[in-house]
Image (cartoon, rainbow, N blue to C red):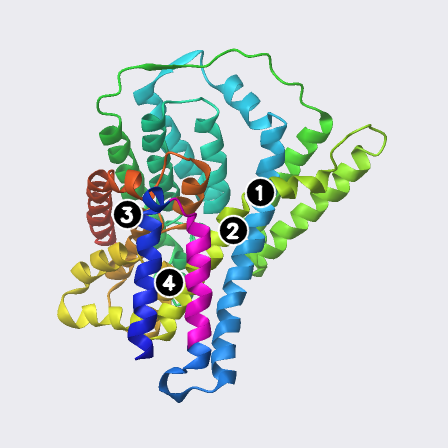
Amino acid sequence: MVTPLILTLIAVAFLLIVIEDIIHVNKAKTTLFFGTLCWIILFISPIHGQSPETIQHQLDHNILEIATLWLFLMAAMTFVAYLNSKGFIQNIVHKIMPNQISERKLMFLIGGFAFLFSSISDNITATLISLAVVMSLKLDPKKLIKYATLIVFSVNSGGVSLITGDVTTLMIFLDEKVTIGHLLLLIVPALSSVALLAAMLSVGMSGNVVFEKQTARRIEKTDITIAVIFFSTIIATLTLSVLYSVPPLLTFLFGLSLMFLVAQFLMRKKDVNKKIIDYIREIEYDTLLFFVGVLLLVGALKEVGMLAKFTHLYELMAPEYANYLMGLLSAAVDNVPLTAALLKADIVMSPQQWLSFTYATGVGGSMLIIGSAAGIIAMSKVKALTFMSYLRMSVYLLIAYTVGYYGSHLAGSLIS
Protein backbone atom coordinates (compact mmCIF):
# COMPACT_ATOMS: atom_id res chain seq x y z
CA MET A 1 0.00 0.00 0.00
CA VAL A 2 2.96 2.35 0.58
CA THR A 3 4.06 2.53 -3.07
CA PRO A 4 0.60 3.54 -4.42
CA LEU A 5 0.31 6.13 -1.64
CA ILE A 6 3.71 7.64 -2.46
CA LEU A 7 2.91 7.74 -6.20
CA THR A 8 -0.44 9.39 -5.47
CA LEU A 9 1.17 12.07 -3.32
CA ILE A 10 3.79 12.75 -6.00
CA ALA A 11 1.07 13.03 -8.65
CA VAL A 12 -0.88 15.48 -6.46
CA ALA A 13 2.28 17.53 -5.87
CA PHE A 14 2.94 17.90 -9.60
CA LEU A 15 -0.73 18.66 -10.23
CA LEU A 16 -0.57 21.52 -7.72
CA ILE A 17 2.43 22.93 -9.60
CA VAL A 18 0.36 22.89 -12.79
CA ILE A 19 -2.62 24.70 -11.25
CA GLU A 20 -0.58 27.15 -9.17
CA ASP A 21 -2.18 30.10 -11.00
CA ILE A 22 -5.65 28.81 -10.09
CA ILE A 23 -5.15 27.97 -6.41
CA HIS A 24 -2.63 30.78 -5.76
CA VAL A 25 -0.48 28.58 -3.54
CA ASN A 26 3.24 28.95 -4.12
CA LYS A 27 4.78 25.85 -5.72
CA ALA A 28 7.71 25.94 -3.29
CA LYS A 29 5.30 25.36 -0.39
CA THR A 30 3.43 22.46 -1.98
CA THR A 31 6.50 20.59 -3.29
CA LEU A 32 8.32 20.96 0.03
CA PHE A 33 5.24 19.71 1.91
CA PHE A 34 4.71 16.63 -0.25
CA GLY A 35 8.43 15.94 -0.68
CA THR A 36 9.05 15.75 3.06
CA LEU A 37 5.77 13.88 3.66
CA CYS A 38 6.76 11.13 1.21
CA TRP A 39 10.04 10.51 3.05
CA ILE A 40 8.35 10.52 6.45
CA ILE A 41 5.99 7.81 5.16
CA LEU A 42 8.97 5.82 3.87
CA PHE A 43 10.44 5.84 7.39
CA ILE A 44 7.14 4.91 9.08
CA SER A 45 6.25 2.16 6.60
CA PRO A 46 9.49 0.91 5.00
CA ILE A 47 9.22 -0.71 1.57
CA HIS A 48 10.36 -4.36 1.35
CA GLY A 49 11.11 -4.40 5.07
CA GLN A 50 14.04 -2.00 4.82
CA SER A 51 15.73 -0.99 8.06
CA PRO A 52 15.69 2.65 9.24
CA GLU A 53 19.46 2.71 8.65
CA THR A 54 18.98 1.80 4.96
CA ILE A 55 16.35 4.47 4.45
CA GLN A 56 18.54 6.98 6.28
CA HIS A 57 21.40 6.14 3.90
CA GLN A 58 19.12 6.69 0.91
CA LEU A 59 17.88 9.99 2.33
CA ASP A 60 21.45 11.12 3.05
CA HIS A 61 22.36 10.48 -0.58
CA ASN A 62 19.34 12.48 -1.73
CA ILE A 63 20.09 15.32 0.69
CA LEU A 64 23.70 15.43 -0.54
CA GLU A 65 22.49 16.01 -4.11
CA ILE A 66 20.09 18.71 -2.89
CA ALA A 67 22.73 20.44 -0.76
CA THR A 68 25.20 20.47 -3.64
CA LEU A 69 22.68 22.09 -5.97
CA TRP A 70 21.41 24.47 -3.26
CA LEU A 71 24.89 25.79 -2.44
CA PHE A 72 25.88 26.07 -6.09
CA LEU A 73 22.71 28.04 -6.84
CA MET A 74 23.27 30.25 -3.82
CA ALA A 75 26.80 31.13 -4.97
CA ALA A 76 25.86 31.79 -8.61
CA MET A 77 22.75 33.79 -7.72
CA THR A 78 24.66 35.96 -5.24
CA PHE A 79 27.15 36.98 -7.95
CA VAL A 80 24.32 37.78 -10.37
CA ALA A 81 22.28 39.62 -7.71
CA TYR A 82 25.24 41.90 -6.98
CA LEU A 83 26.05 42.65 -10.64
CA ASN A 84 22.36 43.25 -11.39
CA SER A 85 21.90 45.64 -8.48
CA LYS A 86 24.92 47.64 -9.63
CA GLY A 87 23.58 47.87 -13.20
CA PHE A 88 26.64 46.05 -14.52
CA ILE A 89 24.77 43.66 -16.81
CA GLN A 90 22.40 46.37 -18.07
CA ASN A 91 25.36 48.63 -18.90
CA ILE A 92 27.03 45.90 -20.94
CA VAL A 93 23.80 45.16 -22.81
CA HIS A 94 23.31 48.81 -23.74
CA LYS A 95 26.92 49.12 -24.89
CA ILE A 96 27.01 46.07 -27.16
CA MET A 97 23.47 46.38 -28.55
CA PRO A 98 22.51 48.80 -31.34
CA ASN A 99 20.03 51.61 -30.72
CA GLN A 100 17.32 49.29 -31.95
CA ILE A 101 16.98 45.76 -33.27
CA SER A 102 14.08 43.83 -34.72
CA GLU A 103 12.32 41.45 -32.37
CA ARG A 104 13.06 38.61 -34.78
CA LYS A 105 16.80 39.30 -34.87
CA LEU A 106 16.82 39.65 -31.10
CA MET A 107 15.27 36.18 -30.85
CA PHE A 108 18.17 34.62 -32.79
CA LEU A 109 20.71 36.72 -30.89
CA ILE A 110 19.39 35.66 -27.48
CA GLY A 111 19.19 32.00 -28.55
CA GLY A 112 22.78 32.05 -29.79
CA PHE A 113 24.01 33.85 -26.68
CA ALA A 114 22.30 31.41 -24.29
CA PHE A 115 23.59 28.43 -26.32
CA LEU A 116 27.16 29.70 -26.37
CA PHE A 117 27.23 30.83 -22.74
CA SER A 118 25.87 27.51 -21.49
CA SER A 119 28.62 25.75 -23.46
CA ILE A 120 31.34 27.59 -21.57
CA SER A 121 29.63 27.80 -18.18
CA ASP A 122 27.08 25.90 -16.14
CA ASN A 123 23.38 25.95 -17.08
CA ILE A 124 22.36 27.83 -13.95
CA THR A 125 24.70 30.75 -14.55
CA ALA A 126 23.86 30.84 -18.27
CA THR A 127 20.13 31.01 -17.51
CA LEU A 128 20.51 33.75 -14.92
CA ILE A 129 22.65 35.93 -17.20
CA SER A 130 20.47 35.37 -20.30
CA LEU A 131 17.28 36.19 -18.38
CA ALA A 132 18.89 39.29 -16.91
CA VAL A 133 19.57 40.51 -20.46
CA VAL A 134 15.99 40.11 -21.76
CA MET A 135 14.35 41.29 -18.55
CA SER A 136 16.30 44.55 -18.73
CA LEU A 137 14.46 45.35 -21.99
CA LYS A 138 10.98 45.61 -20.40
CA LEU A 139 9.28 43.50 -23.05
CA ASP A 140 5.58 42.70 -23.35
CA PRO A 141 4.80 39.70 -21.04
CA LYS A 142 3.63 37.49 -23.95
CA LYS A 143 6.82 38.17 -25.87
CA LEU A 144 8.93 37.75 -22.75
CA ILE A 145 7.47 34.25 -22.36
CA LYS A 146 8.72 33.38 -25.86
CA TYR A 147 12.22 34.70 -25.16
CA ALA A 148 12.34 32.87 -21.82
CA THR A 149 11.18 29.65 -23.51
CA LEU A 150 13.96 29.97 -26.07
CA ILE A 151 16.51 30.59 -23.32
CA VAL A 152 15.51 27.40 -21.47
CA PHE A 153 15.79 25.30 -24.64
CA SER A 154 19.02 27.01 -25.76
CA VAL A 155 20.73 26.62 -22.39
CA ASN A 156 19.88 22.92 -22.23
CA SER A 157 21.02 22.44 -25.84
CA GLY A 158 24.30 24.28 -25.33
CA GLY A 159 25.60 21.91 -22.68
CA VAL A 160 25.08 18.53 -24.36
CA SER A 161 28.25 18.56 -26.47
CA LEU A 162 30.68 19.21 -23.61
CA ILE A 163 31.34 17.10 -20.52
CA THR A 164 31.42 20.30 -18.45
CA GLY A 165 28.10 21.51 -19.86
CA ASP A 166 25.71 18.88 -18.52
CA VAL A 167 25.86 16.35 -15.70
CA THR A 168 24.28 13.55 -17.77
CA THR A 169 26.78 14.14 -20.59
CA LEU A 170 29.60 13.76 -18.07
CA MET A 171 28.03 10.57 -16.64
CA ILE A 172 27.76 8.96 -20.08
CA PHE A 173 31.32 10.01 -20.94
CA LEU A 174 32.77 8.64 -17.67
CA ASP A 175 31.02 5.33 -18.36
CA GLU A 176 32.97 5.25 -21.66
CA LYS A 177 29.85 5.16 -23.83
CA VAL A 178 30.98 8.17 -25.89
CA THR A 179 34.22 10.09 -26.45
CA ILE A 180 34.97 13.81 -26.58
CA GLY A 181 35.13 13.56 -30.37
CA HIS A 182 31.69 11.93 -30.48
CA LEU A 183 30.17 14.64 -28.29
CA LEU A 184 31.49 17.46 -30.48
CA LEU A 185 29.35 16.04 -33.30
CA LEU A 186 26.28 17.21 -31.34
CA ILE A 187 27.13 20.90 -31.78
CA VAL A 188 25.58 21.22 -35.26
CA PRO A 189 22.23 19.45 -34.57
CA ALA A 190 21.88 21.14 -31.17
CA LEU A 191 22.53 24.62 -32.56
CA SER A 192 20.30 23.94 -35.58
CA SER A 193 17.38 23.02 -33.33
CA VAL A 194 17.86 26.27 -31.37
CA ALA A 195 17.80 28.26 -34.63
CA LEU A 196 14.65 26.41 -35.71
CA LEU A 197 12.90 27.18 -32.41
CA ALA A 198 13.94 30.83 -32.67
CA ALA A 199 12.48 30.97 -36.18
CA MET A 200 9.17 29.44 -35.06
CA LEU A 201 8.82 31.63 -31.99
CA SER A 202 9.60 34.77 -33.98
CA VAL A 203 6.73 34.20 -36.43
CA GLY A 204 4.37 37.16 -36.14
CA MET A 205 6.98 39.36 -34.52
CA SER A 206 7.38 42.45 -36.67
CA GLY A 207 8.24 45.14 -34.18
CA ASN A 208 11.52 46.57 -33.05
CA VAL A 209 13.13 46.66 -29.65
CA VAL A 210 14.44 50.10 -28.87
CA PHE A 211 17.27 50.34 -26.40
CA GLU A 212 16.66 53.46 -24.39
CA LYS A 213 19.88 55.33 -23.99
CA GLN A 214 19.62 55.81 -20.30
CA THR A 215 22.35 57.49 -18.38
CA ALA A 216 24.82 54.73 -17.73
CA ARG A 217 25.20 53.98 -14.08
CA ARG A 218 28.69 54.58 -12.83
CA ILE A 219 30.55 51.31 -12.47
CA GLU A 220 32.96 51.28 -9.58
CA LYS A 221 36.32 49.54 -9.68
CA THR A 222 34.93 47.19 -7.06
CA ASP A 223 32.11 46.14 -9.42
CA ILE A 224 34.56 45.48 -12.27
CA THR A 225 36.77 43.47 -9.93
CA ILE A 226 33.83 41.34 -8.78
CA ALA A 227 32.74 40.78 -12.40
CA VAL A 228 36.27 39.58 -13.20
CA ILE A 229 36.17 37.25 -10.18
CA PHE A 230 32.79 35.93 -11.37
CA PHE A 231 33.93 35.07 -14.88
CA SER A 232 37.28 33.78 -13.60
CA THR A 233 35.34 31.49 -11.27
CA ILE A 234 33.37 30.11 -14.23
CA ILE A 235 36.57 29.43 -16.19
CA ALA A 236 38.29 27.94 -13.14
CA THR A 237 35.26 25.73 -12.47
CA LEU A 238 35.49 24.22 -15.96
CA THR A 239 39.29 23.93 -15.97
CA LEU A 240 39.70 22.38 -12.52
CA SER A 241 36.80 20.01 -13.12
CA VAL A 242 38.34 18.65 -16.33
CA LEU A 243 41.99 18.59 -15.25
CA TYR A 244 41.75 17.63 -11.58
CA SER A 245 38.13 16.52 -11.03
CA VAL A 246 37.57 19.32 -8.52
CA PRO A 247 33.81 19.50 -7.81
CA PRO A 248 32.26 22.61 -9.44
CA LEU A 249 30.57 23.47 -6.14
CA LEU A 250 33.91 23.74 -4.35
CA THR A 251 35.37 26.09 -6.96
CA PHE A 252 32.27 28.29 -7.02
CA LEU A 253 32.19 28.60 -3.22
CA PHE A 254 35.87 29.52 -3.32
CA GLY A 255 35.05 32.21 -5.89
CA LEU A 256 32.23 33.50 -3.69
CA SER A 257 34.52 33.69 -0.66
CA LEU A 258 37.10 35.52 -2.78
CA MET A 259 34.39 37.98 -3.82
CA PHE A 260 33.53 38.66 -0.16
CA LEU A 261 37.16 39.13 0.88
CA VAL A 262 38.16 41.33 -2.05
CA ALA A 263 35.05 43.52 -1.70
CA GLN A 264 35.67 43.84 2.04
CA PHE A 265 39.21 45.08 1.31
CA LEU A 266 38.17 47.48 -1.48
CA MET A 267 35.23 48.91 0.46
CA ARG A 268 37.02 49.33 3.78
CA LYS A 269 37.37 53.12 3.42
CA LYS A 270 34.00 53.75 1.80
CA ASP A 271 30.81 54.78 3.54
CA VAL A 272 28.48 52.07 2.27
CA ASN A 273 25.13 51.20 3.80
CA LYS A 274 25.12 47.67 2.47
CA LYS A 275 27.74 45.05 3.16
CA ILE A 276 28.74 42.75 0.32
CA ILE A 277 27.51 39.64 2.14
CA ASP A 278 24.03 41.16 2.41
CA TYR A 279 23.44 40.44 -1.30
CA ILE A 280 22.78 36.83 -0.33
CA ARG A 281 19.46 38.10 1.04
CA GLU A 282 18.42 39.21 -2.46
CA ILE A 283 18.30 35.60 -3.69
CA GLU A 284 14.83 34.23 -4.41
CA TYR A 285 14.67 31.56 -1.74
CA ASP A 286 11.38 30.36 -3.22
CA THR A 287 13.49 28.99 -6.07
CA LEU A 288 15.82 27.15 -3.71
CA LEU A 289 12.96 25.70 -1.65
CA PHE A 290 11.23 24.60 -4.85
CA PHE A 291 14.40 22.74 -5.84
CA VAL A 292 14.48 21.00 -2.46
CA GLY A 293 10.85 19.89 -2.77
CA VAL A 294 11.17 18.66 -6.36
CA LEU A 295 14.36 16.69 -5.67
CA LEU A 296 12.83 15.12 -2.56
CA LEU A 297 9.87 14.00 -4.70
CA VAL A 298 12.15 12.59 -7.39
CA GLY A 299 14.21 10.84 -4.71
CA ALA A 300 11.07 9.22 -3.33
CA LEU A 301 10.10 8.19 -6.87
CA LYS A 302 13.48 6.51 -7.20
CA GLU A 303 13.15 4.69 -3.87
CA VAL A 304 9.80 3.10 -4.80
CA GLY A 305 11.49 1.68 -7.91
CA MET A 306 9.69 3.68 -10.61
CA LEU A 307 12.82 5.01 -12.31
CA ALA A 308 14.19 1.52 -12.88
CA LYS A 309 10.97 0.56 -14.69
CA PHE A 310 11.64 3.14 -17.38
CA THR A 311 14.49 0.99 -18.66
CA HIS A 312 11.92 -1.63 -19.73
CA LEU A 313 11.25 0.58 -22.76
CA TYR A 314 14.35 -0.90 -24.36
CA GLU A 315 12.77 -4.35 -24.19
CA LEU A 316 9.70 -3.11 -26.03
CA MET A 317 11.25 -1.06 -28.86
CA ALA A 318 14.47 -0.28 -30.69
CA PRO A 319 16.97 2.00 -28.89
CA GLU A 320 16.41 4.81 -31.42
CA TYR A 321 12.75 5.13 -30.40
CA ALA A 322 13.32 4.34 -26.72
CA ASN A 323 15.98 7.08 -26.47
CA TYR A 324 13.57 9.61 -27.95
CA LEU A 325 10.92 8.71 -25.37
CA MET A 326 13.46 8.72 -22.53
CA GLY A 327 14.25 12.31 -23.45
CA LEU A 328 10.58 13.22 -23.13
CA LEU A 329 10.34 11.34 -19.83
CA SER A 330 13.27 13.36 -18.49
CA ALA A 331 10.97 16.39 -18.60
CA ALA A 332 8.87 14.86 -15.82
CA VAL A 333 11.64 12.99 -13.98
CA ASP A 334 15.11 14.28 -13.13
CA ASN A 335 17.44 13.22 -15.96
CA VAL A 336 20.34 12.40 -13.62
CA PRO A 337 18.73 9.40 -11.81
CA LEU A 338 17.09 8.43 -15.12
CA THR A 339 20.51 8.29 -16.81
CA ALA A 340 22.01 6.49 -13.82
CA ALA A 341 19.26 3.86 -13.97
CA LEU A 342 19.93 3.25 -17.66
CA LEU A 343 23.70 3.00 -17.20
CA LYS A 344 23.27 0.51 -14.34
CA ALA A 345 20.94 -1.59 -16.48
CA ASP A 346 23.88 -2.35 -18.84
CA ILE A 347 21.75 -1.85 -21.96
CA VAL A 348 23.76 -2.59 -25.09
CA MET A 349 23.77 0.28 -27.58
CA SER A 350 26.12 1.47 -30.31
CA PRO A 351 28.10 4.73 -29.89
CA GLN A 352 25.65 6.33 -32.35
CA GLN A 353 22.71 5.36 -30.14
CA TRP A 354 24.46 6.53 -26.98
CA LEU A 355 25.10 9.86 -28.68
CA SER A 356 21.39 10.22 -29.44
CA PHE A 357 20.60 9.31 -25.83
CA THR A 358 23.01 12.03 -24.65
CA TYR A 359 21.14 14.63 -26.70
CA ALA A 360 17.73 13.30 -25.61
CA THR A 361 18.38 13.43 -21.86
CA GLY A 362 20.17 16.77 -22.11
CA VAL A 363 17.52 18.59 -24.14
CA GLY A 364 14.36 16.57 -23.41
CA GLY A 365 13.93 18.27 -20.05
CA SER A 366 13.04 21.45 -21.95
CA MET A 367 9.64 20.01 -22.86
CA LEU A 368 8.23 20.97 -19.43
CA ILE A 369 9.12 24.04 -17.41
CA ILE A 370 9.82 21.83 -14.37
CA GLY A 371 11.97 19.44 -16.41
CA SER A 372 15.29 21.21 -15.98
CA ALA A 373 17.16 23.57 -13.68
CA ALA A 374 17.03 26.22 -16.40
CA GLY A 375 13.24 25.95 -16.56
CA ILE A 376 12.74 26.16 -12.82
CA ILE A 377 14.97 29.23 -12.57
CA ALA A 378 13.17 30.88 -15.50
CA MET A 379 9.77 30.21 -13.89
CA SER A 380 10.91 31.83 -10.66
CA LYS A 381 12.39 34.87 -12.40
CA VAL A 382 9.70 35.62 -15.00
CA LYS A 383 6.30 36.09 -13.35
CA ALA A 384 4.40 35.62 -16.62
CA LEU A 385 6.12 32.27 -17.21
CA THR A 386 4.02 29.58 -15.52
CA PHE A 387 3.57 25.87 -16.12
CA MET A 388 0.58 26.51 -18.38
CA SER A 389 2.02 29.46 -20.33
CA TYR A 390 5.14 27.39 -21.06
CA LEU A 391 2.98 24.41 -22.02
CA ARG A 392 1.44 26.53 -24.78
CA MET A 393 4.86 26.49 -26.44
CA SER A 394 5.00 22.69 -26.33
CA VAL A 395 4.33 22.16 -30.05
CA TYR A 396 7.27 24.40 -31.02
CA LEU A 397 9.48 22.75 -28.40
CA LEU A 398 8.54 19.25 -29.52
CA ILE A 399 9.30 20.05 -33.17
CA ALA A 400 12.69 21.57 -32.28
CA TYR A 401 13.53 18.62 -30.00
CA THR A 402 12.51 16.09 -32.65
CA VAL A 403 14.59 17.78 -35.36
CA GLY A 404 17.56 18.02 -32.98
CA TYR A 405 17.21 14.38 -31.98
CA TYR A 406 17.05 13.25 -35.62
CA GLY A 407 20.09 15.42 -36.31
CA SER A 408 21.97 13.80 -33.44
CA HIS A 409 21.17 10.38 -34.93
CA LEU A 410 22.53 11.49 -38.32
CA ALA A 411 25.61 13.00 -36.66
CA GLY A 412 26.19 9.69 -34.89
CA SER A 413 26.33 7.92 -38.27
CA LEU A 414 29.67 9.72 -38.83
CA ILE A 415 31.23 7.70 -36.01
CA SER A 416 33.54 5.16 -37.58
Q: Label 3 neighbourhood size at 10 Å, few (<14), some (14-19), many (20+)?
A: many
Tag 2 or tag 4, which sits nearer the N-term? Answer: 4
Q: Are marks 1 and 2 in contact (CB under 8 Å)?
A: yes
Q: How many angstroms separate mark 1 from mark 2 (CA)? A: 9 Å
Q: Foreground mark, 4 or 1? A: 1
Disc 4 on helix, strand or loop? Answer: helix
Q: Residue furthest left?
A: 317
Give the residue pinned by disc 3.
367
Give the residue pinned by disc 2.
288
Q: For this view, does 116 lie left or right of residue 88? A: left
Q: Which residue type carries mark 2?
A: Leu
Give the residue pinned by disc 1.
283
What range is drawn magenta here?
Answer: 24-41
Disc 2 on helix, strand or loop? Answer: helix
Q: Which residue type carries mark 3?
A: Met
Tag 1 or tag 4, which sits nearer the N-term? Answer: 4
Q: Could you say which is closer to the camera, residue 369 or residue 285? A: 285
Tag 4 or tag 3, which sits nearer the N-term? Answer: 4
